[in-house]
Amino acid sequence: MKVLLVSTVAFLALARGAGAQPPQAEPHTIVFFGDSLTAGYGLDDPAADSFPALIQERIVAAGLPWKVVNAGLSGETSSGGLRRLEWILRQPADIFVLELGANDGLRGVSPAVIQANLEAIIGRVRALRPSATIVLAGMRMPTNLGDEYTRAFAAVFPAVASREKVALIPFLLEGVGGRPELNQGDGIHPTAAGELVVAENIWRTVHPMLSAK
């Protein structure tokens, strides 16, 4: 009888274990920290059509345990981003994509100031979220701002990436900038079709990181 009782208890324990579901792991977080380009300014449905939303779609389709946070703010500058960074990083950030500088460039801010601000943001991210992988999105300015300024501005992003040893998306708007059919009437912000191209530019860089974490 004792043997039968022990066997029955063991069988019931195994049966319960077989039906139990393993606990679901908390998803990792990728934060897109930027300006109106990140926020999806001018789109009919930014929550669905902005490039952070499109990246989330790809993540879901790939079955990866990640969630996207869109921390874009229209009109944001590199100095403004530095001021609001701590508030954003009250939440987790396993990958931090930094997309700032375009509004500085349009206002003619010194490239040296932009570079200092971007480096300060990266340093602060490392202090607050030391395990985060940081990605910097490169940007360029229209040529009507003058050759000297546009060259100096474009050089900021690879210089920061090299100095800070972070991943670089060479030009966020590659394949979109300067193409009227992929931009809204202001010639600056992508249409929904343009956002698909931008999302692909980002995905090439971040996809391997998502699988590696």
Image: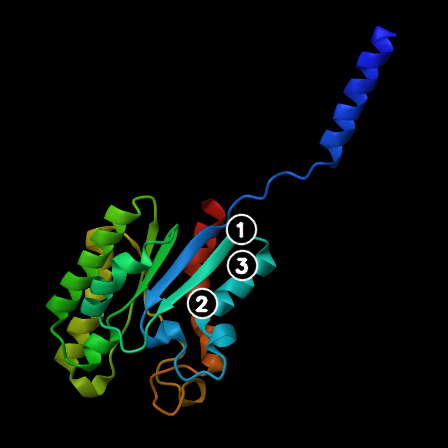
**Residue type pointed to by label 2:** Pro
Question: SS of the residue at dot 1?
Answer: loop
State the mark number for residue 59. Answer: 3
* Mark 1 vs 2, N-terminal side: 2
**Residue type pointed to by label 1:** Pro
* 11 in relation to 68, above or below: above
Relative image position of residue 13 (x, y in whole percent): 75, 24
State the mark number for residue 52. Answer: 2
What is the spatial separation of the Cα atoms under label 3 and label 1, in whole angstroms?
Answer: 8 Å
Residue 5 figure quarter: top right
Relative image position of residue 9 (x, y in whole percent): 79, 19
Q: Which residue is mark 1?
A: 65
Residue 146 seen in the current view: yes
Relative image position of residue 60 (x, y in whole percent): 57, 59
* 157 in relation to 13, above or below: below
* Mark 2 vs 3, N-terminal side: 2
Task: Locate residue 3 relative to residue 41 in the image: left or right.
Answer: right
